[in-house]
Image: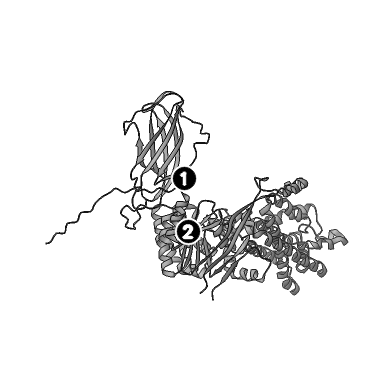
């Protein structure tokens, strides 16, 4: 049997104009016909968002699409959902295709929940009859029964997201194209959506294309995976293999280099400054993905512009929630001092950081306890943990069930009564 | 049998497009319904605006052009004379201006889901057509009040007049909608343009004041439509079929140009908006 999706040498070119930052206005063309001609002569820069991508998807397969920002994932989805045409190549889709590039497509704030269910459902490709059949299921999943006749503009954002997902989850098409819609909503709702998605796909044998940055979601939902880099498909195949190839490719790119920017030092004394920050883990410098079971070393380079005693603080946060806090003087009683124009490197090393799978960022703070704050860099470094599986059982401890792991034993005593 | 979709670089016109629009007719109704429902939300009198607009214009024009300026009407009472012009004109002008903005206003949908883009203009046209039908009730009331009875040809020709107006509005609207995607000036120029257009359309006056040059005006499809409607409903003069023919050809040409331009723009509109 022929595959349900055939993608052959698909490519998409964008032309980037440097002359006009903004919209071209009619006035520009009318008032400066010569200039307008000249502008045309200076060729706009070509940018291939997608370059010669080919793959097939069999019926019932779930294909994950991963890659860095700007790798061409969204462009691929937009072409496959026919929102934008390709420049070259061809794609053949057998069956009805629905694309879910956002939650609540077509919602109108002035209309009631009931009206929006029908509107959005029909826009996403259902017939009125199909929406009517699924109506109760949609309402039940979204949990907005009480507000069905209230205009959506009075809904909380959580409610409209739930309603939007409920409509989308009940789409009946053979091929479903999904772009990180799960990135919205709270953790509990995300889990509910993931559960619903795997249930829907398992039951109906549908084909799904799923773009996400969430490697654990990709791993748990998909069986095949394609990895894009600079518009090209670099890895394709079994999901476990592609994800691990992707992770190793991404290492060495994790530093958020905000130190080079002019930081202004507002409200800071700047007597000592952070001049460099380096992370080493599992033999890699500045990894994007940290192995939580290998040794991690955070190295801060500090330069003084005056004689000063100070403390170094590193705090690791998940979103805005503080997870770990390290304070050289107040917790560890280490005295640090520098003379003017001296430089030092301070390292903090952790044998097993054991953080649950999630995204983290580090804030770095230099201050004199009881005195001035010298330097503060929020988000000096971002990293992710993809899987935490301390006993190699195959179970991934993610941020949905824990913050981190502590080593432990179970003791079992059987009582014979 | 499964539907097979082939995605390729942009294609030229194909019959497939027409079939596709037909397949999406439910979506067309849903979009038109949305347009109608949303338009008068948060207004005090709500849908009554559909009646207010022509009535208020009719009263104002009757006072100034009918009573003070004493515009010639070829013998018909001024209120009903101007109302016939107004309901067609308002259908046309509101459709043109709404269609012109429909791609930009629906950008959030256009960039997230695919269906033939031309459904937006068609749905807008449909919504304004419903407004037009409601406004026709006033005309019926006025016809009864002034005791005018349209002849059989008048009743038969009325749908044709509506079709000509709709095609002209769609053609011009599609053209401006496409232009609007590229040049945002259109949004600001359009209200003036429509106002100018009203002066070259015999809404408040009769084409008879133009004398023998009246036929030139027939190039404006609305002129032919309004003139024919007046002659058939008010029986003040015989219908000029040649002029109506010119108007019909003109509106088809407008649709052709508008449609082609729209086709050219819709494929890459997402990358531009």
Mark 2 secondary-structure assignment? helix
Q: Residue furthest left?
A: A417
Would residue B141 appear left or right of A403 to someone viewing this image? right
Asked where in the image residue A31 lies, by quadrant, the reply is top right
The residue indicated by pointer 1 is A254
Pointer 1 indicates a residue of which chain?
A: A
Would residue B98 appear left or right of A55 to someone viewing this image? right
Pinpoint residue A5: horizontal percent, then vertical percent: 53, 67
The circle on residue B198 is: none
Q: Residue at image x 41%, y 46%?
A: A283
Pinpoint residue A52: horizontal percent, then vertical percent: 58, 60
Would residue A353 appear left or right of A78 to someone viewing this image? left
The circle on residue A164 is: 2
Pinpoint residue B35: horizontal percent, then vertical percent: 59, 59
- The relative height of residue A302 versus residue A140 in the rendered view (above or below) is above
Pointer 2 indicates a residue of which chain?
A: A
Mark 1 secondary-structure assignment? loop
């Amino acid at each position: 049997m022929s595959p349900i999706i055939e993608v052959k040498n698909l490519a998409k070119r964008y032309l980037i104009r440097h002359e006009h930052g903004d919209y071209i206005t009619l006035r520009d063309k009318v008032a400066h016909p010569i200039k307008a001609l000249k502008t045309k002569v200076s060729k706009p820069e070509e940018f291939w968002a997608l370059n010669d991508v080919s793959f097939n998807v069999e019926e019932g397969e779930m294909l994950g699409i991963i890659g860095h920002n700007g790798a061409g994932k969204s462009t691929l989805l937009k072409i496959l959902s026919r929102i934008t045409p390709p420049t070259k190549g061809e794609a053949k889709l057998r069956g009805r295709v629905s694309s879910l590039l956002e939650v609540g497509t077509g919602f109108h704030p002035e209309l009631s929940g009931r009206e929006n269910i029908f509107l959005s459902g029909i826009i996403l490709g259902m017939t009125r009859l199909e929406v009517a059949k699924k109506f109760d299921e949609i309402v039940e999943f979204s949990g907005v029964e009480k507000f069905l006749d209230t205009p959506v503009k009075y809904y909380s954002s959580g409610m409209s997201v739930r309603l939007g997902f409920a409509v989308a989850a009940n789409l009946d098409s053979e091929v479903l194209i999904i772009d990180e819609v799960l990135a919205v909503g709270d953790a509990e709702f995300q889990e509910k959506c993931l559960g619903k998605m795997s249930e829907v796909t398992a039951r109906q044998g549908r084909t799904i294309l799923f773009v996400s940055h969430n490697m654990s979601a990709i791993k748990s939902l998909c069986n095949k995976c394609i990895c894009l880099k600079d518009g090209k498909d670099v890895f394709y195949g079994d999901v476990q293999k592609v994800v691990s190839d992707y992770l190793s490719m991404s290492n060495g790119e994790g530093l958020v280099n905000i130190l080079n920017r002019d930081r202004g030092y507002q409200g800071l004394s700047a007597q000592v400054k952070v001049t460099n920050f380096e992370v080493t883990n599992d033999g890699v410098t500045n990894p994007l993905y940290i192995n939580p079971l290998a040794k991690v070393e955070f190295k801060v380079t500090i330069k003084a512009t005056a004689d000063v005693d100070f403390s170094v603080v590193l705090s690791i946060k998940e979103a805005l929630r503080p997870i770990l806090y390290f304070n050289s003087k107040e917790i560890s009683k280490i005295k640090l001092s520098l003379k003017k124009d001296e430089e030092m490197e301070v390292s903090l090393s952790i044998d097993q950081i054991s953080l649950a799978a999630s995204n983290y960022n580090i804030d770095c703070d230099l201050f004199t306890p009881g005195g001035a704050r010298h330097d503060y860099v929020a988000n000096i470094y971002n990293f992710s943990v993809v899987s935490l599986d301390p006993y190699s059982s195959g179970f991934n401890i993610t941020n949905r069930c824990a913050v981190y792991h502590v080593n432990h034993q179970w003791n079992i005593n059987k009582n014979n009564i | 049998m499964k539907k097979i979709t082939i995605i390729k670089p942009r294609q030229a016109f194909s019959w497939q497009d027409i079939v596709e629009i037909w397949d999406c007719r439910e979506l067309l109704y849903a979009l038109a319904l949305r347009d109608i429902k949303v338009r008068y939300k948060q207004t005090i009198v709500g849908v009554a605006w559909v009646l207010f607009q022509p009535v208020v214009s009719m009263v104002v024009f009757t006072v100034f052009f009918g009573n003070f300026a004493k515009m010639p009407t070829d013998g018909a009472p001024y209120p009903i004379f101007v109302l016939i012009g107004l309901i067609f004109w308002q259908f046309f002008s509101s459709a043109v201006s709404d269609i012109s903005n429909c791609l930009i206003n629906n950008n959030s949908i256009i960039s997230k889901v695919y269906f033939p883009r031309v459904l937006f203009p068609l749905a807008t046209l449909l919504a304004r057509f419903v407004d037009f039908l409601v406004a026709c009730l006033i005309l019926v009331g006025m016809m009864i009040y002034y005791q005018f009875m349209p002849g059989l040809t008048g009743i038969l020709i009325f749908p044709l007049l509506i079709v000509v107006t709709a095609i002209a509005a769609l053609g011009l609207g599609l053209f401006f909608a496409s232009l609007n995607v590229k040049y945002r000036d259109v949004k600001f120029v359009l209200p003036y343009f429509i106002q100018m257009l009203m002066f070259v359309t015999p809404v408040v006056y009769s084409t008879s004041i133009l004398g023998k040059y009246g036929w030139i005006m027939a190039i404006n499809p609305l002129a032919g439509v309004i003139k024919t409607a007046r002659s058939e409903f008010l029986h003040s003069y015989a219908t000029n079929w040649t002029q109506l023919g010119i108007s019909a050809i003109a509106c088809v040409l407008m649709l052709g140009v508008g449609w082609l331009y729209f086709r050219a723009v819709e494929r890459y509109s997402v990358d531009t908006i």
